[in-house]
Image: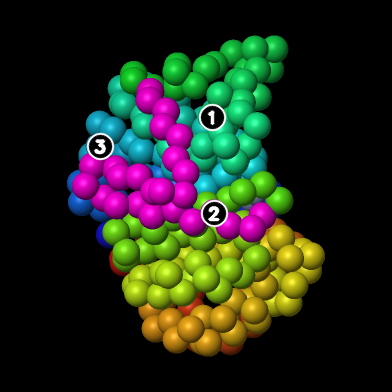
Amino acid sequence: MKLTVLGSNGWFPANGQLTASYMLEYNGSLIIIDAGTGIANFYLHKDILEKYDTVHVILSHYHFDHSVGIVYLNRWMTDKQLCFYFPAGKYYHSGAIGFENVIFAKDYNSGSLKGLAKRVSVFEYDENGFTINRIKIKTFALKHSNTSFALNFDGKFLYCTDTSVDENVLKENINCALIAHECWGKTDISGGRHTDFESLALVLNKIGYAGKLLLIHKNPDLSANDYKEMTQNRQDIAVAMDNDVIEI
Ligand SMILES: [Zn+2]
Ligand SMILES: [Zn+2]
């Protein structure tokens, strides 16, 4: 499993860091997790894109810092098949169709979801999980202003963003080799909508998590140094930076 960071910020691009997007290469499949402005970093990873005819794109939720890069995809996908996996309508008013109607509203965007690639398919997922080729993806609904989903890939890697710390979800994923978890600050500054480092470290310690931790969805108001100070150079914790490559 190889994870390439395309965009490691939350909310907006800052400090040279784009918003949420990650590229996962595993078992012959290419999976893009979230599609924020980080999609624009595709141009640095053409060698990876060239290897695959099909690209799978999963959104954890529809907030624009995780989804706006979808409108950039046709730059790289004209000869490919694109498969989207969007949170189901039952968690929102209208799910994938509502999202498409907003992001490709006729008066504001000349493109369309179907026009992004040679072939485009759209699946909606829920809390029962789904599979991509033979890869099992477990999904966990998180507490956020709109439902966001944590995603577990074959029991090895957990992607968990836009949530307060959820002890139950983390417990269920304790055997992962890597947890990529959002970290919005040292202490809670979000009123419980996001994760602070102190609460996350406390819960992971309490449940006895022994794998590695990657801090993602960085707060654009904090610098790389702020994050370094936060983690106090702990060997088992890394702070995601755009275009980092992580072997899982
Ligand atoms: Zn976000
Ligand atoms: Zn969000």
Which comes sooner in the sequence, label 1 or label 2?
Answer: 1
Contact check, label 3 and label 2, Cβ < 8 Å: no
Which numbered marker is on residue 52? 3
| Secondary structure state at the residue bearing disc 2 | strand
Tell me how far mark 1 sits from mark 2, CA to CA: 17 Å
Residue 79 lies left or right of residue 109; in this view the side is: left
Q: Is mark 3 within 8 Å of ligand 1?
A: no
Q: Earlier in the sequence, mark 3 or mark 2?
A: 3
Q: Is residue 211 or residue 13 the one in the foreground?
A: 211
Give the residue displayed 61% in from the left and 28% down from the top: 94
Q: Name the residue type under label 1.
A: Ala
**Spatial CA span between label 3 and label 2:** 30 Å
Q: Is residue 78 left or right of residue 29?
A: right
Q: Quadrant of residue 231?
A: bottom right
Residue 1 at x, y = what percent? 27, 59
For the C terminus, the image quarter is bottom left
Q: Secondary structure at mark 1?
A: helix
- Identify the residue position indicated by label 2 in the image: 141
The residue positioned 65% from the left and 65% from the top of the image is 164
Give percent across and percent down for residue 86: 49, 37
- Residue that mark 1 sits on: 96
As drawn, 10 above or below 121: below
Residue 57, numbered label? none
Majority secondary structure of magenta residues: strand
The stretch of residues the image draws in magenta is 120-144
Relative to 61, is 2 on the left or the right? left
Where residue 189 appears, as percent x and y from the top left, is 78, 68
How crowded is the residue under tag 1: few (<14 C-alpha within 10 Å), some, or many (20+)? Answer: many
Q: Is mark 1 within 8 Å of ligand 2?
A: no
